[in-house]
């Protein structure tokens, strides 16, 4: 088949079952068909440990306690909940694309999605209703930019998920 990394087929067109590597130092997933062999080196656990650190979890909890009630009052429960779930899924997808070995899971991508939605919503409202909304949109953009910059400064945080959440939230706004 096209794109195959290994040709396990014999002359009769049948393929052999995947083989496990014999090394004890590196764990691996069996190869099959079009998927390359992927080795687990322990860096994935390092990434997960950083993504699930206590300060990161506490920031997520603080963000949820501050942002979610405001967004729920402003946009309604169904809109806020749908946006939260959709932007969380988009953040996980962005994380999986950029960090295929260790995609992160958590609330921060969805929280960035809510920030992106609110920023876009306020920017659209500013076009219709004036400067007050523009100032609010700029304040949210500054907070979001600062949080993204902080994510670059702290090793192990999943900025791909944060950016994926922000962009998908802006598209929802």
Image (cartoon, rainbow, N blue to C red):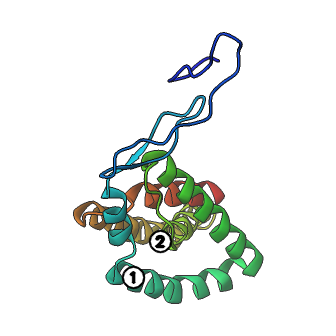
Secondary structure at badge 2 equals helix
Measured in 3D between alpha carbons, the distance from the residue under mark 2 to the one under mark 1, in whole angstroms, is 8 Å
Q: Residue at x 73, y 72 (%)?
A: 79
Q: Which residue is mark 2?
A: 108
Image coordinates of residue 138 in percent, x first then y, are 42, 66
Q: Residues within 10 Å of mark 1 (few under 14, many from 20)?
A: few
Looking at the image, do the residues carrying marks 2 and 1 touch, with CB atoms under 8 Å apart? Answer: yes
Task: Find disc 1 in the rendering and name its residue.
Answer: 59
Give the residue displayed 47% in from the left and 57% down from the top: 103
Residue 90, horizontal then vertical, whole percent: 59, 56
Vertical order, 72 against 130 (above or below): below
* Residue 124 image point, x, y percent: 60, 60
Residue 130, picture quadrant: bottom right
| Label located before the other in sequence (2 or 1) | 1
The image shows residue 47 at horizontal and vertical percentages of 34, 62
Q: Nearer the viewer, residue 120 or 160?
A: 160
| Residue appearing at x 29%, y 52% in the figure | 25
Q: Residue furthest left?
A: 153
């Amino acid at each position: 088949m096209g794109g195959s990394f290994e040709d396990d087929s014999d002359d009769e067109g049948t393929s052999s079952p995947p083989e496990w590597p014999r090394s004890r130092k590196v764990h691996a997933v069996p190869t099959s068909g079009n998927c390359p062999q992927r080795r687990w080196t322990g860096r994935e656990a390092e990434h997960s440990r950083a993504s699930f650190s206590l300060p990161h979890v506490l920031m997520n909890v603080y963000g949820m306690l501050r942002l979610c009630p405001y967004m729920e009052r402003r946009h309604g429960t169904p809109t806020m909940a749908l946006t939260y779930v959709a932007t969380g899924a988009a953040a996980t997808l962005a994380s999986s694309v950029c960090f295929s070995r260790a995609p992160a899971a958590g609330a921060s991508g969805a929280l960035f999605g809510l920030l992106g939605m609110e920023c876009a919503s306020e920017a659209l409202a500013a076009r219709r209703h004036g400067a007050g909304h523009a100032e609010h949109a700029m304040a949210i953009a500054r907070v979001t930019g600062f949080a993204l910059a902080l994510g670059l400064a702290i090793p192990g945080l999943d900025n791909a998920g944060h950016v994926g959440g922000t962009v998908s939230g802006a598209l929802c706004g």
